[in-house]
Structure formats: C-alpha cells, structure tokens
Amino acid sequence: MLKKIIKFILIILVMSLIFNFSSDNSTTSTKKSDGLISKVGEIIIGRNLTKEEKNNYINKYVILVRKSAHFIIYLFLGILLISFIKEFKINNSLQLALLTSLFYACTDEIHQYFVPGRSCEVRDVLIDTLGAFTGIILYKYIYKLRRSLHEQKETTC
C-alpha cells in the first residue's frame, strides 16, 4: 500500500511541476530556457559567453531545448503512470497510462492558452505523448528484463 501511495504522490508532483512550468508567462518561460542554454554553453566552452555568443546559442538551440523538456518530463510521467497502474494488475495498463498522459498533455496545452504570451500547440501534445510512450515502453522493457533475470537466477539455484 505504501508503494502505491508513494507512486501516486510522485505522479502528482510531476504533474504539478508540468503545471507550474506551463503557468509561466512567455517572458518568464523564455528567461528560464534562455538561461539554461547560456549556462550549458558556458560549461561546454569553459568561459563566460559574450552577449552575441549567448544570443547565437539561444537562437540555435531554443527549439531543441524547449521541445526536449516536453519530451523528458512526460517520459518520467509515463514511467510513473505505468508503474502505478501495474500495481493494480489492470489489463491494458499500457493503453491506460498512454491515454492518461495524452489527456494530461491536452489539458496542459489548453491551460497554456490562457497564460499571457503562451500558446496551445498540437505539436507539443504530440511531443509530450511521444515522451510518455517512450517512458512506458522503457519501463515495460526494463520490467521484462528484470523478470527474465530473476527467473534465470531462480532456475540456477
């Protein structure tokens, strides 16, 4: 029972994190992603970047960073959802986890529509859902691998 509660809390935390990022207006959101790109650029180069270099990095990587963030956070959500749903031994757990992720991605984009300077994009729903699907498949693969290794260990004992 404690495992289920912890998994549920983690799902709520990740969903809250997504909601909080989506609540940022366009200026705040841009500052966060631009700041991340600048810091990573400085780490890679090993020195402070000039304003022109920062702008070049930002222009070059902003889409990649922003869309990767969508993919990665939903990857974690997918892993958490499938793990939680598997606790209840529900048939079609993969489909349920994926539909839950898709639903949350849709509501997240609708929420962003009402945030100043933000938009509602189908492309982001697709990226989010692909991230969740990747997390779900990764979980399923690791789950099967662990079961297989456990069964091999038992047969050798």
Image (cartoon, rainbow, N blue to C red):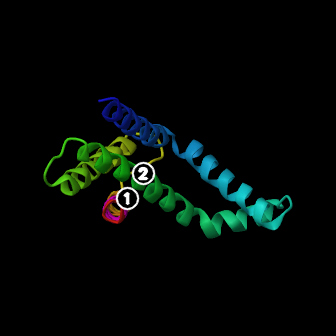
Badge 2: how crowded within 10 Å, few (<14), some, or many (20+)?
Answer: some
Left or right of residue 65: residue 43: right
| Mark 1 vs mark 2, CA separation in Å | 6 Å
Residues at marks 1 and 2 touching, judged by CB atoms closer than 8 Å: yes
> Is 98 covered by the magenta stretch?
no
Relative to 118, residue 126 above or below: below
Label 2 sits on what residue type? Phe
Magenta span: chief secondary structure: helix
Q: Work out whether mark 1 precedes mark 2 in sequence or the reverse, and give the earlier one.
A: 2
Q: Which residue is drawn at 29% across and 44% down?
A: 107
For this view, does 62 lie left or right of residue 141?
Answer: right
Q: Which residue lies furthest to the front in this view?
A: 157
- Residue 3: where, in percent of width, then height? 35, 35
Q: Is residue 6 above or below residue 71?
A: above
Q: What stretch is highlighted in magenta?
A: 140-153
- The structure residue drawn at horizontal position 36% and vertical position 46%, both measured from the top left corner, is 80
Residue 128 vertical position relative to residue 56 in the rendered view, above or below: above
Q: Residue 122 carries which label?
A: none
- The crowd level at tag 1 (other Cα within 10 Å; few <14, some 14-19, many 20+) is many
Tag 1: amino acid: Gly
Judging from the image, what secondary structure is the residue with disc 1 in?
Answer: helix
The residue at which mark 2 appears reads as 76
Residue 70: name its quadrant: bottom left
Where is residue 147 shown, x and y percent of the image? 31, 59
Name the spot of residue 24 as percent of width and height, x first.
51, 40
- Quarter holding the C terminus is bottom left
The residue labelled by disc 1 is 135
